[in-house]
Image: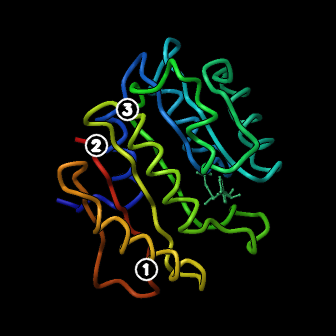
């Protein structure tokens, strides 16, 4: 057998958590690959909320969704994921089943604009409040760039401190690869 690689494993977790009619969140739109994947999972009766601070990311994601005619089931916010709680309409609170944060910089974009642990932690805390029990938050952590290593350290310290009565936290990582490859933290709300 082949051990599941990092990005396929992230998607596998989301597939298990999110189904037709569900509510999901993409905390970092980037080029919209994950948003499209979530939009397919929720089907035409579900809803995806997506966040990014860069206009380019919203444009790329909108184009990708329109190409596949998935745009009507997605609501995009041109703001940081740290505004999750106030952005997702209250009647969806308690119903979010899956969320993904593909961290780091926009591929093909400005590499100086990166995610930071402070906003990711704020978003995770807000999501834990508005997720359904057994909802999953998947963090894909890129530790290969300088700010990524800092972000990794702060995020690991934070997730290790989450009360086990509140959530289960999993780390999925290949530990003998060179060049600090990305790894996953998955948080399951209890
Ligand atoms: N999921 C994307 C995809 O499928 O193409 C890749 C995401 S990319 C690695 C990271 C993105 O996070 C960038 O587009 C960046 O602008 C965005 N970002 C940085 N800080 C953010 C914040 N506070 N809230 C939301 N997005 C943020």
Identify the residue position indicated by label 1 in the image.
Answer: 153
Placement of 103 over or under 60, stated as above or below = below
Question: How far across and down, in percent of the image, does residue 160 sit?
Answer: 28, 68
Rounded to the nearest angstrom, the CA distance separating label 1 from label 2 is 22 Å
**Residue bearing mark 3:** 97
Residues under labels 3 and 2: Cα distance?
A: 9 Å
**Of helix, strand and loop, which one carries label 2?**
strand
Q: Quick one: label 1 or label 2, which is nearer the N terminus?
A: 1
Q: Which of marks 3 and 2 is nearer the N terminus?
A: 3
- Secondary-structure class at tag 1: helix
Q: Find residue 70 and report its image quarter.
A: top right
From the image, which quarter does the N terminus lie in? Answer: bottom left
Nearest the eye: 2 or 143: 143
Q: Do the residues labelled 3 and 1 touch (CB within 8 Å)?
A: no
Farthest-out residue, top: 45
Question: Is 105 located above or below residue 64 in the figure?
Answer: below
């Amino acid at each position: 057998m082949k051990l599941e690689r990092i990005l396929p494993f992230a998607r596998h977790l989301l597939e298990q958590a999110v189904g037709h009619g569900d509510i999901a969140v993409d905390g970092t739109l980037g080029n919209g690959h994950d948003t499209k994947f979530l939009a397919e999972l929720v089907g035409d009766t579900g809803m995806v909320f997506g966040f990014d601070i860069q206009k380019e990311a919203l444009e790329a994601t909108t184009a990708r969704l329109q190409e596949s005619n998935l745009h009507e089931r997605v609501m995009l916010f041109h703001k940081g994921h740290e505004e999750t709680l106030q952005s997702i309409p209250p009647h969806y609170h308690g119903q979010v089943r899956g969320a993904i944060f593909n961290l780091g910089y926009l591929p093909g974009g400005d590499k100086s604009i990166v995610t930071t642990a402070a906003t990711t932690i704020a978003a995770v805390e807000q999501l834990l409040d508005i997720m359904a029990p057994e909802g999953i938050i998947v963090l894909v952590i890129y530790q290969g760039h300088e700010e990524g290593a800092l972000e990794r350290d702060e995020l690991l310290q934070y997730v290790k401190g989450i009360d086990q009565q509140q959530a289960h936290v999993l780390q999925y990582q290949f530990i003998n690869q060179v060049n600090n490859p990305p790894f996953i933290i998955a948080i399951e709300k209890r």
